[in-house]
Image: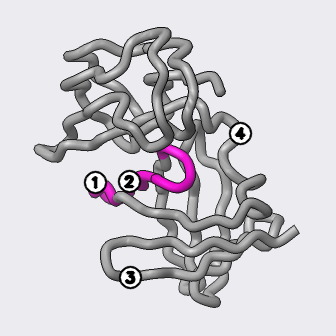
Amino acid sequence: MAQRYRLQHGDTTYAVETQGDGVVLVDGAACTVAPFGPSRYRVTTPDGRVTVVSVAGSTPALWASTGGRAYELAVDASARARTGARAAASDMTPPMPATVVKVVVAVGAAVEAGAPVVILEAMKMELTIRAAHAGVVRAVRCAVGDLVKPGTVLVEIDQ
């Protein structure tokens, strides 16, 4: 079943449609996407270029990291399209190797969707990991000073 999204990066909006079998249309151009480890994907563009992209967060706020750069993305997905969101949407993960500089929440705390939960630093950039949804913090799996890798679960939130 195809799912449609609008992806916002800065002033640019992209039309994204998942086709199934690893095919994703980005503004009509067919890319092939395949899992490449936890929260990582191998993306092949129509001209044959291959890129590995790490993804963290969940709709509507995502982080993508590729080629040593991190990108904050805003995803507009209808309720119907949301069923394609990450299965582990309650797990917050870093988009790239980073250092934990601040843990904003504690176990048992109530959080709103989009609220900051952990602040990371990578390549002299501050990255804010935000709550995927409203709920109660079940676990904090990092501490200030920890070096964390993409796919490392930082915070778990129960709905």
Q: Which residue is mark 2?
A: 65
Closer to the chain start, of discs 3 and 4, is 3
Magenta-span inclusion, residue 107? no
Q: What is the spatial separation of the Cα atoms under label 3 and label 4, in whole angstroms?
A: 27 Å
- Image quarter (top left, top right, bottom left or bottom right) of the C terminus: top right
Say which residue appears at 51% left-offset and 81% top-offset. 14
Q: Are marks 1 and 3 in contact (CB under 8 Å)?
A: no
Q: Nearer the viewer, mark 1 or mark 4?
A: 4
Q: CA distance from mark 2 to mark 4?
A: 20 Å
What's the mark number on residue 87? 4
Q: Residue furthest bottom?
A: 28
Residue 68's mark? 1
Q: How many marks?
A: 4
Determine the secondary structure under disc 3. Answer: strand
State the mark number for residue 60: none
Q: Secondary structure at mark 4?
A: loop
Looking at the picture, tell me which residue is in the foreground, 72 or 80.
Answer: 80
Q: Quadrant of residue 145?
A: top left
Q: Which residue is mark 3?
A: 12
The quadrant of the rendering that contains the N terminus is bottom right
Mark 3 and mark 2 lie on one chain; the one further toward the N terminus is 3
Q: Amino acid at mark 2?
A: Ser
Left or right of 98? Residue 25 is right
